[in-house]
Amino acid sequence: MLVLNVNRNDVIYGVEVKPLKKNSLVTLLLFTAVFSALSIIYFGVVPLFQQERHPVVIAVSKSPLSTPFYVAKAINAFDDTCVAPEYIAVAGGQLAFEKVMSGQADFATSSDSVIAFESLKARPFVTHAMFVQSDNDVKIITRKVDNIRAFIDLKGKRIGVTKGTASEYILSTLLAIEGLSLGDIVLQDYPPEHLIEAFRHNEVDAILPWEPFAFQTLQSLKSKIKIHDTKSLSTLSFNLISQTAEQNLVEQAVCVIQGLQKAIHYITSYPEQAKSIVITELAVSTDFIDWVWPDYIFKLSLNQSLILNINAQANWAVATQMTSVDVTSSAINFIDSRALLKVDPGAVNISR
């Protein structure tokens, strides 16, 4: 700092300079001291009061339906929230659900079909938010040589599904359109990742895989198969679930949803970058992502459509004697809207 020692009425470069009065000098020193103290507080102490972050484990189904989670991780969407997530990758929403119920995960991605079937077991879980929908994720695949042109031709055929998931429910829906039931076919149960091999080894005549397994079947068997048009016949959603939530878990769900909200905004604003993130995360091709992307609607919500869809699937499971339970519990009992209401009140539209 340059200090000029001037006397009263000294002239410097032709300008008369008057010395600071004693009070002015004290004021200047006080201002400097306060400014320095505030700077130390802002840059040094404030970070100590940033939101505490809690480690949480999230079981994430290996599917492009989980895109918001992949994007959230890639753009650090959880950094400003109260959670520090660790992902467990699993094959399907059913396995993700079991990770939560066994205590291996705090949260999971799960389809509405899994939620419907699990609700019949009266297990202590809740759904915090729906974050994506697709009307074409599960596909029915047959061999061209078998000449199965319509769903009525499935009668008497061996059909591979993953029981207790959207795969089985959508098959039942397609059969019902033709006046058939599961009793009219030979139903065979496989883990989702084994459906392709069962089909390849001629153990079944048709399979109902979800993505990315449907696309993998197409890539593997190419012109030998036929993928039937099932678009808009059924809607599949992916949801954030946990065990029945105490207040601490609800607060953590708020933070997870905040991260998902940022991710969905990013997906909407930068779809090509979001696709690249999914391609890297799932080690899939650009062709595959272009194949499924138009079918997806990424949006946070809890609405009456979800309730009706879960109830319909639960009622179907009882009617087809998939379970020993003969009375269903309304899906509303497995919805916890507290977290989503804090993040986006307008996204909640359910009636009790």
Image (spheres, rainbow, N blue to C red):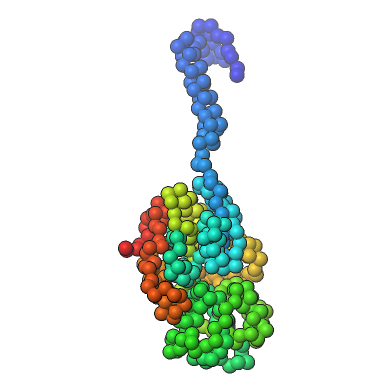
Q: Name the residue: 54% across, 91% down.
A: 156
From the image, which quarter does the C terminus lie in? bottom left
Left or right of residue 192, residue 345 in this image: left
* Vertical placement of residue 16 versus 195, above or below: above
Coordinates of residue 6 in the picture (x, y in percent): 55, 9
Observer-nearest residue: 320 or 147?
A: 320
Left or right of residue 344, residue 264 in this image: right
* Vertical placement of residue 259 versus 275, above or below: above
Q: How many marks?
A: 0
Q: Name the residue: 48% across, 85% down.
A: 182
Coordinates of residue 221 in the picture (x, y in percent): 66, 82
Task: Work out whether residue 269 can be spotted.
Answer: no
Coordinates of residue 37 in the picture (x, y in percent): 52, 24
From the image, which quarter does the N terminus lie in? top right
Question: Which residue is outermost to the top?
Answer: 7
Left or right of residue 118, residue 208 in this image: right
Coordinates of residue 216 in the picture (x, y in percent): 64, 75
Task: Work out whether residue 283 can be spotted.
Answer: yes
Observer-nearest residue: 49 or 37?
A: 49
Observer-nearest residue: 91 or 8?
A: 91
Q: Name the residue: 51% across, 12% down.
A: 17
Question: Which residue is outermost to the left?
Answer: 352
Q: Name the residue: 54% across, 70% down.
A: 293
